[in-house]
Every structure is written in C-alpha cells, then in structure tokens.
Amino acid sequence: MNDFALSRRNVIRSLFSSSLLMPGVLSELFAADNPLAARSSHVPAKAKSVIFIYATGGVSHIDTFDPKPTGKGRDGSGNDKLMGNIFGADRNRECGTEVSNLFPHLRTMMQDICVIRSMKASHFDHSEATLGMHTGSPTFARPSMGSWISYGLGSFNQNLPSFIVIAPHLPYGGTQVYASDFLPAVHQGTRVLPGDNPIANLKPPGSTGSLQELEFNLVDQLNQRHFRERSHDTALAARIRSFETAFQMQQAAPEAFDLKSEPAHVQTMYGLDRKTKGPGADFAWQCLVARRLVERGVRFIELIDTGSRPNWDSHGEMKEHADLAYNVDQPMAALIADLKQRGMLDETIVVWATEFGRTPTREGKNGRGHHRDCFSIWLAGGGFRGGHVHGVTDEIGKYTVEKPVEVHDLHATILHQLGMNHEKLTFRHAGRDFRLTDVHGHIVQEILS
C-alpha cells in the first residue's frame, strides 16, 4: 500500500500533465503549492490550533457564567417577572470566578479560563446569530472562521483535514457554519459523527490494494476528462485534490478516532463511562477525539453538542439546562486539564460559545426568551488570561455596563493569538477583498496574558 501511495501521485501527475490546465489550478492540486501546507503567520503566534465548542440554542448567561441572585422580586413568586439564577452558584477557590452549580467540574478549572461576560450577539434569531458567531455575517453567506484559519495557516498534517467538525446533529444555519463559501473548497469543514463510523465511506470496500489501485486509476482518468472541459472551476480542482487527502485519511483517520488505545483513567476522566441522556450524550467522545486531533496536527476542530432541536433554547423551562450541562461539564473540564498536563494548552485555544444569552425575565412557565444585548462565553489556553473575567453586566443581566465585546472583536482576537492580522487575512472575491472581520474588529488586549 505504501508503494501505491507513492505511485498514485505520479499517476495523477501523468494524467494531468497532458491537460491544458491553468497554472493556478495545478498549484492548488499538488504539493508545490499545496493549499493545506502549513504557512507562516503574520507575526509570531501564541497558539497553533483551535478547539471551538459550540452550544446550540442560546445558553442563559444568568444561569451559568454570569450568575445573578434570586433576591426580592426575583424569586419566581409571580410578583415580578424577573428571575435570577435558579441553580445556585459558587466561586473558584483559586481565582474567585463565580460559576453556576450547573458546571461544578468546569468551576474547578476557572483559574485557566478567561470569561467574557459582555458579549453582544450579532442577531436575535437563532440561524442569523449562529452564522454571525461562525462567519462574522448574520445575513450573508460567508466562510466559516475555521475555513479562514485553514486558508491562512494551512495544516500540520496532510493526512487529515485541516478543519474538522464533530457534530451529531447540525445546528441552526446548517452546513453554512462550516462552509468555505468563496474560499477554495479544500478549506471547508469535514463533518464527523460520534460513534463507530465517524466518517462515511472511509473504509475502502475492496480487500486488496491492487483492486483499489484499479479503481483509483479509473477515477483519475475520468477526472482528467471531466476537468479538461472545466479548467476554470476551482471547486472542481479542490474536489479532485480532496481525493488525495481521502486516500491518506483511510490510513490516518481510523487511528485518530479509535479510543481503544486511551488508558482507562483518561477515558474515566472525560466521563466516557458515565450514563448520560438526551442531547449531548456523546460529548465526552467528542472532547477526547478533539484532543487526539490536536495532537495529530489538525488546525481547527469544532465540537457541536446538540442540533437545531432539542437544545439550550429553554423558552418554557430553565430546568432543561440541567441535563445539557451535565453531559458537557465534565468532558470540557477534562479537555482543559488533559491539554494542560500534556503541555498542549499554551498552544491550543479552547473556546466555548453560544449564539446569544437569555432574558432576565421569565417566559412561559419558567423559561427565558432570546437575549442579544449581553451574554457570556469563555476561552482557555493559547495566551488568554486564566482566572480573568472581562466585562460587567447590570444587576439583572440585561445590558453590558463595562467593556462590551462584539463578535468581530472576538474573531480578531483569536486570529491575533494565531499570529494573523485580521485586517491582512483577506481573499479577493467579486471585485473586493473580503475578510472574517469585514470592516470591523478590535483586538481585546485585556483578555490576553
């Protein structure tokens, strides 16, 4: 099989050498200018990789990372529609950051976590706010942050995609959350499903290398004939290039997703042996695989805990947050601890985010509505200030009163830690230079160590 891996590239080169292909397309296809090759950053980088954890539905900041008290008039008695944190809260003993009792494991790690309590959402509806958090644009199709980072920095491992999305279900916004849009298609996210068959059709159907070689040779010949008539189509060029990665993935991906080699104590630390229920039940698997992918040089990994329904969108009953938090609390804390003990946290940015917060007033029996004016996210590793809380909201959690942060600011700061100037990371499309932060974005220096 190793001989075949070498000869196959020669076969493809031979097949394409007689074609009238654009030089730019050839550079996209082969290693001389491999679009996924690791690239130098604009400036020295603090971090090399990103694990982006996305909680679908709009997590209540009041009940999680910006707890508000249930004092007089806020006790759900019916005398007032205001409702404080219904789960209780406590402080991390080392840094003092207050966290809801929904996240007891994560609370023990707050000395390594920077909380932003002053985020402002880009929209008040799910799909638009989700796209805003992922792409910087709530209203127009734009490349995902993962695609931008793949385009700007490439990958350390040519046998795996540079951008992997582990999602049991699609969130609001569908596949656009990991789409490359006008960027070369090789930078779009590859979706992985938790379980025994994470990537469909990864295992070759044939039992011998010779049979697979015949199949690939036939595909290569058909690709050449098809592409000769469509040499202007960069998406097609990227698709053909993806066959090369797909072949290498047959060797690398099964090992990356196989957790049998992980020691029992590591699996227990992540909570793989726990009984979970409802949305997010596979999240321990997702977090442990994310660590393994970072170890193997994948540039950007996104973990989506639930889909477009059911999720954190607790309009009728806030107690729905409890099971969702239980499923993700221990795995997220374990991920941070595991990266730290392996010496990987300093070079890995771990981000937890949602699309917006929830109202300080009750909706329905005991729920909350959508709230875009302020909500909480957190970041760990990659040069972010552990034990730090940025921004302040008012006493009921309705508005930011100090140090607001826009989504474009968040993106600019993440890119900065990866060594990229958000104003210089551009792509020419439709007559203008586009970037992740559009014409906005400021680096939030106060959250950096």
Image: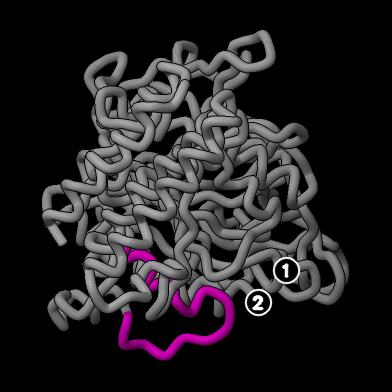
Crowdedness of circle 2 by 10 Å Cα count: few (<14), some, many (20+)? some
**Residue drawn at the location 46% of the way across and 22% of the way down:** 21
| Figure quadrant of the C terminus | top left
Q: Would residue 169 be found to the left or right of residue 141 on screen?
A: left
The relative height of residue 219 versus residue 132 in the rendered view (above or below) is below
Number of callouts: 2
Q: Are marks 2 and 1 in contact (CB under 8 Å)?
A: yes
**Residue drawn at the location 63% of the way across and 66% of the way down:** 307
Nearest the viewer among 399 and 245 is 245
Q: Which mark is residue 320?
A: 2
**Residue drawn at the location 38% of the way across and 80% of the way down:** 196
Nearest the viewer among 216 and 248 is 216
Q: Position of residue 302 (x, y in %)?
A: 45, 52
| Residue 279 is a magenta residue | yes
The relative height of residue 2 versus residue 21 in the rendered view (above or below) is below
**Residue drawn at the location 67% of the way across and 54% of the way down:** 174
Q: Would residue 350 be found to the left or right of residue 144 on screen?
A: left
Q: Amino acid at mark 2?
A: Glu
Q: Which residue is mark 1?
A: 314
Q: Magenta region's main secondary structure?
A: loop
Q: Position of residue 319 (x, y in %)?
A: 65, 77
Q: Amino acid at mark 1?
A: Ser
Q: Position of residue 292 (x, y in %)?
A: 24, 60
Tell me where the magenta segment starts and ends, as one range.
272-289
Q: Would residue 209 be found to the left or right of residue 427 on screen?
A: left
